Amino acid sequence: MAVNFFTSDPQALLDNFNKRIDQEDPKGKITTWVRDADGDYTHVASDWGGKAWFRPKIISGALVFNILGRKKFFMPSVVYGYYHGHLTETFLNHFDTMFTSSSSTALATKDDTLGGSEAQQVE
């Protein structure tokens, strides 16, 4: 469940994402994502904030965001679908000239964490 943004300069793409989150000027500011002390991102919508996080990773030719679930709850598909869709939307709205394409994996990769193994589901 990773989101990949294919680009010749993945570090610049990540730096610009952070800059737009942190900037004071409301024009062009990204207000739908926040970064925590670990450098991970969560959505701020009241119904969705803190249900998952994205951890960025730079690889050759791509900026990858791996999803991280909450420790005590297994992440249902509606949560990772929401997070993947909204991150892609944010990058299309703000950085469409900085990457050539994006993709989302349907299933977890080795770097994704879906949360706890308890049977309890979070809607």
Image: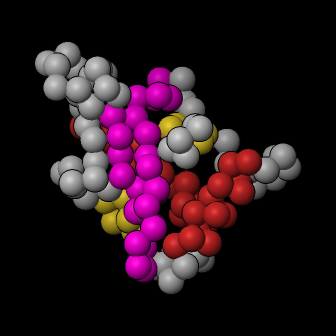
The vertical placement of 23 against 32, above or below, is below
Q: Residue furthest right?
A: 25
The total number of labels drawn is 0
The vertical placement of 58 against 21, above or below, is below
Residue drawn at point x = 33 percent, y = 65 percent:
103
Residue drawn at point x = 50 percent, y = 38 percent:
42
Q: Residue furthest top?
A: 120
Residue 121 included in the magenta stretch of the image: no
Along the viewing direction, whichever of 61 and 28 lies nearer the viewer: 61
Task: Name the quadrant of the C terminus.
Answer: top left
Q: Residue furthest front?
A: 38
Residue drawn at point x = 46 percent, y = 56 percent:
56
Along the viewing direction, whichever of 71 and 48 lies nearer the viewer: 71
- Residue 87 location in percent, x, y? 48, 51
Question: Which quadrant of the view contains residue 45?
Answer: top right
- Residue 85 location in percent, x, y? 40, 50
- Residue 8 location in percent, x, y? 50, 83
The vertical placement of 55 against 72, above or below, is below
Along the viewing direction, whichever of 70 and 93 lies nearer the viewer: 70
Highlighted range, magenta: 47-69
> Does residue 80 appear to the left or right of 14 in the view shown?
left
Residue drawn at point x = 27 percent, y = 31 percent:
115
Q: Mostly what secondary structure, the magenta segment?
A: strand
> Does residue 6 appear to the left or right of 44 in the view shown?
left
Along the viewing direction, whichever of 28 and 35 lies nearer the viewer: 35
> Does residue 62 appear to the left or right of 42 in the view shown?
left
- Residue 121 location in percent, x, y? 22, 20
